[in-house]
């Protein structure tokens, strides 16, 4: 059975987090400071070693300076457009 943390859908989610951080020209250290976390926490999140709950994701979005609902809307659009979508989360 496929581990949910490594599902295709979850990899799209992680890609979106990394891409948005890069598009804002923010480092992992800067995001970590905004979250009152360590750089290694952000790194583990981006590599899929540490999952985020919905409250943490909302805080992550705020640290990125993006609207939480807009993040979810974009994610849903990317998942719907994925040819391999429908993986377990």
Image (tube, grey):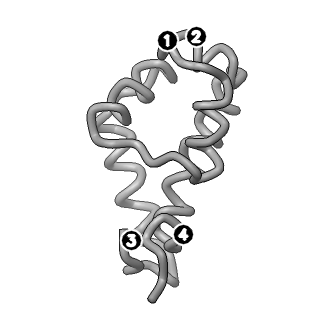
Secondary structure category for the residue under label 2: helix
Q: Point out the frontmost of discs 4 and 3.
A: 4
Label 1's element?
loop
Q: Place residue 86 in its image quadrant.
A: bottom left
First of labels 4, 1 by sequence position: 4
Read off the residue under disc 3.
80
Disc on res. 77:
none
Please rate how many residues cluster around mark 1, counting C-alpha atoms within 10 Å: few if below 14, some from 14 to 19, many from 20. few
**Rendered position, 16 above or below 57:** below
| Screen quadrant of the C terminus | bottom left
Query: Circles 1 and 2: CB distance less than 8 Å?
Result: yes
Q: Could you tell me which quadrant the N terminus lies in?
A: bottom left
Could you give the CA–CA distance between mark 4 and mark 1, rounded to whole angstroms? 27 Å
Query: For the residues marked 4 and 3, what is the alpha-carbon distance in whole angstroms?
Result: 18 Å
Residue assigned mark 1: 36
Q: Residues within 10 Å of mark 3 (few under 14, many from 20)?
A: few
**Which one is nearer the viewer's eye here, 64 or 10?**
10
Contact, mark 4 vs mark 3 (Cβ under 8 Å): no
Residue position for label 2: 33
Determine if residue 20 is in view: yes
Identify which residue is drawn at 53% across, 18% down: 37
Question: Distance from label 1 to label 3 (Cα)?
Answer: 33 Å
Q: Position of residue 68 (x, y in %)?
A: 32, 33
Q: Earlier in the sequence, mark 1 or mark 3?
A: 1
């Amino acid at each position: 059975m496929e581990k949910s943390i490594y599902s295709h859908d979850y990899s799209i989610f992680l890609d979106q987090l990394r891409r948005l951080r890069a598009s804002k020209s923010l480092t992992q250290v800067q995001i970590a400071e905004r979250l009152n976390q360590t750089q290694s926490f952000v790194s583990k999140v981006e590599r899929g070693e540490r999952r985020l709950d919905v409250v943490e994701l909302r805080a992550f979005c705020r640290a990125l300076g993006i609207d939480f609902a807009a993040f979810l809307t974009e994610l849903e659009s990317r998942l719907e457009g994925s040819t391999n979508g429908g993986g377990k989360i």
